[in-house]
Amino acid sequence: MFQINGDSKKDSKTKKKAAKSESDDSEPETKPSKTKKKTNSNPASMFQAGGDKDKDKDKGKDKGKGKDKDKDKDKDKDKDKKTKKKAKAEESDDSDSEVTQKKKKGKGKKGKKEERPPSPDIEFDNLEEFVLQPAQQGVTVKCRVTRDKRGMDKGLYPTYYLHLDNDKKVFLLAGRKRKKSTTSNYVISIDPTDLSRGGENFIGKLRSNLMGTKFTVFDNALNPDRALPDMSNARQELAAIIYETNVLGMKGPRRMTVVIPGMNKDSERVPIRPRTDNDGLLNRHQNRNLENLIELRNKTPVWNEETSSHVLNFNGRVTQASIKNFQIVHSKDVDYIVMQFGRVADDVFTLDYSYPMCAIQAFAIALSSFDGKIACE
């Protein structure tokens, strides 16, 4: 997807053959390594901010020119490679079949566990650092969101909890809508029992506009008015969520845009610390100033004639239909799911996120979907 296109299909085929001939590994070993490269390298290049993409493209062009000059040599190498492969294939038919069978068995096991897929490799010492760090490349962090409506006023102000979706059910975040606020304002905490704005466990907040169609996610640093002149201790904007207004009142799936800071060469988030709201993520997106920003959108559902409804493939992670079900993707690769969210019970939802998103960003986006939107539905 991110390679420079050649002059013709033949050139692209010879380039692929040349790339194969340069490696000394056998075919069964190279295929898995290629899949790993796709999952690990593509997200980094897709979400990297700055002008490094153009440099990479120029390097790709130079490599392409070099390969075009050596077409004849590559063809000879390909012939030798094919003959070697045939000989190896005749000698190791049994071993190859065992590899493919193991792969099939592994896929079957994964399919059975889709109802409650654990994340056993995710361990952390500092919860505050973990929820702010982007997910590791190639790893999907699978979580569950539970909604608690019990109590006198929790019908209007329910509490939401985010846990890792595994046997231990490790707690990550809690969120609740603030009372007596002119707009929807959610407090996010790393303590399920302390949801106060001034508490030590306050980690971030989600704030909406008057219409409830645009949201901004902040961390727990200082307001720009109280920050140092160099803005080093000022709060960061971690995400902006824009829901498309439904002026005609026609029923259908929601349309949403998510804007998050881009990533640098070290796969770290580029800090966005606006001095005023005019320089925030929402205004930058509105003015199409997307420097150091990543623009994501929800994947468009497909209409199913049999069920007479819009459907998305959640791979078993979502079991109930809801207007709140969505998948967030990048326009360059709609098959790479940055985040997905959906209902599995009346007050239980699955939330999965991948690089470059972090837990606070994903949880805040989920909270924005719970908020009532008269103009969008």
Image: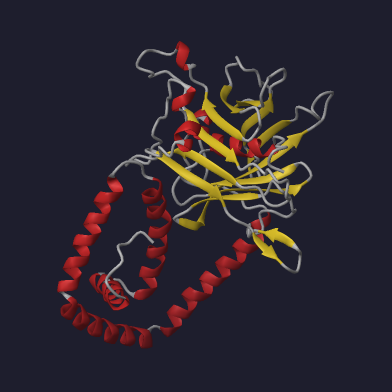
Q: Looking at the rendering, in which quadrant would you find the C terminus?
A: top right
Q: Which x, y percent locates residue 21?
A: 25, 74
Along the line of sight, the residue nearer the viewer: 167 or 226:
226
Along the line of sight, the residue nearer the viewer: 93 or 299:
299
Q: Residue at x 60, y 38 (%)?
A: 365
Q: Which x, y percent locates residue 276?
A: 46, 21
Q: Which x, y percent locates residue 170?
A: 62, 37
**Residue 193 appears anywhere in the view:** yes
* As drawn, 49 above or below 313: above
Q: Looking at the rendering, in which quadrant would you find the N terminus?
A: bottom left
Along the line of sight, the residue nearer the viewer: 235 or 201:
235
* As drawn, 254 above or below 281: below
Q: How is the image coloured?
A: secondary structure
Q: Quadrant of residue 332?
A: bottom left
Q: Does 277 sit left or right of 67 as displayed?
A: right
Q: Quadrant of residue 160?
A: top right
**Numbered-mark total:** 0
Q: Residue furthest right?
A: 152
Q: Residue at x 57, y 17 (%)?
A: 200
Q: Residue at x 60, y 56 (%)?
A: 300
